[in-house]
Image (cartoon, rainbow, N blue to C red):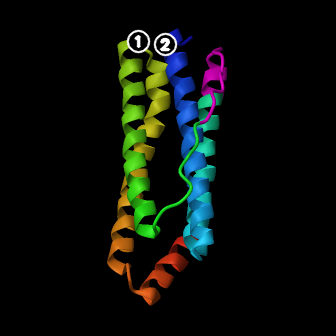
């Protein structure tokens, strides 16, 4: 059984994961409207992954006999200046999510909640990957910015995800 404060923190994380999903869906829609079908596809995959993360937290709370409280999801931005800004915001956001995961880890350690500590290790590893991927794509987008042919190739690569 997890503590009440851990239950509350995980419910907040479920909300954060769903907000992340909405953010990436919004980026997908904006990318599509700008003609970047590959970028749009990449962000739709990211949307699905974030929803999967939220549901893993839901399942974990249920497995611990804890109550899932679905909180309101705040509005997300709807437009970015282009692909570079989208991935700048993605990297910034993933760093924020990393800090949220680390806070959950700190709380689990304080509670001596070994089951939750173990559960969270997936997310610790996942965030390393998320930040690295966002950084790599951002650097590529910066490299090709202004070059239509290279931007097209990057868009195609991201569409292959």
- 71 within the magenta span: yes
Q: Which residue is mark 1?
A: 111
Please indicate, yes or no, whether residue 49 appears anywhere in the rendered image.
yes
Of helix, strand and loop, which mostly describes the magenta segment? loop
Assess disc 1: are there few (<14), some (14-19) or many (≥20) residues with their C-alpha within 10 Å of its C-alpha.
some
- CB of mark 2 within 8 Å of CB of mark 1? yes
Q: Which residue is mark 2?
A: 5
Nearest to viewer (mark 2 / mark 1):
2
Q: How far apart are the two marked residues, 2 and 1, measured between alpha carbons?
A: 9 Å
Of the numbered discs 2 and 1, the one sitting upstream in the chain is 2
The mark found on residue 156 in the picture is none
| Quadrant location of the C terminus in the rendered image | bottom right
Toward the viewer: 121 or 103?
103
Toward the viewer: 92 or 102?
92
Determine whether, in the image, residue 72 is placed left or right of residue 95.
right
Across and down, in percent, residue 64 comes to 61, 17
Across and down, in percent, residue 3 comes to 51, 10
Q: Which stretch did the figure color magenta?
A: 59-73
The residue positioned 62% from the left and 70% from the top of the image is 33
- SS of the residue under disc 1: loop
The residue positioned 37% from the left and 31% from the top of the image is 102
Please tell me in which quadrant of the rendered image residue 11 appears: top right
């Amino acid at each position: 059984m997890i503590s009440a404060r851990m239950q509350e923190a995980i419910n907040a994380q479920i909300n954060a994961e769903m907000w992340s999903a909405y953010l990436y869906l919004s980026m997908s829609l904006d990318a599509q409207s700008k003609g970047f079908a590959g970028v749009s596809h990449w962000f739709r995959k990211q949307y699905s992954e974030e929803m999967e993360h939220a549901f893993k937290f839901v399942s974990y709370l249920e497995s611990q006999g804890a109550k899932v409280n679905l909180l309101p999801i705040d509005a997300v931005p709807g437009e970015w200046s282009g692909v570079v800004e989208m991935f700048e915001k993605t990297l910034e956001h993933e760093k924020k999510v990393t800090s949220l995961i680390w806070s959950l880890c700190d709380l689990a350690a304080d509670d001596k909640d070994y089951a939750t500590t173990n559960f969270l290790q997936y997310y610790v590893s996942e965030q390393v990957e998320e930040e690295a991927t966002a950084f790599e794509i951002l650097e590529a987008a910066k490299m090709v910015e202004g070059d239509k042919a290279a931007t097209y190739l990057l868009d195609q690569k991201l569409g292959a995800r």
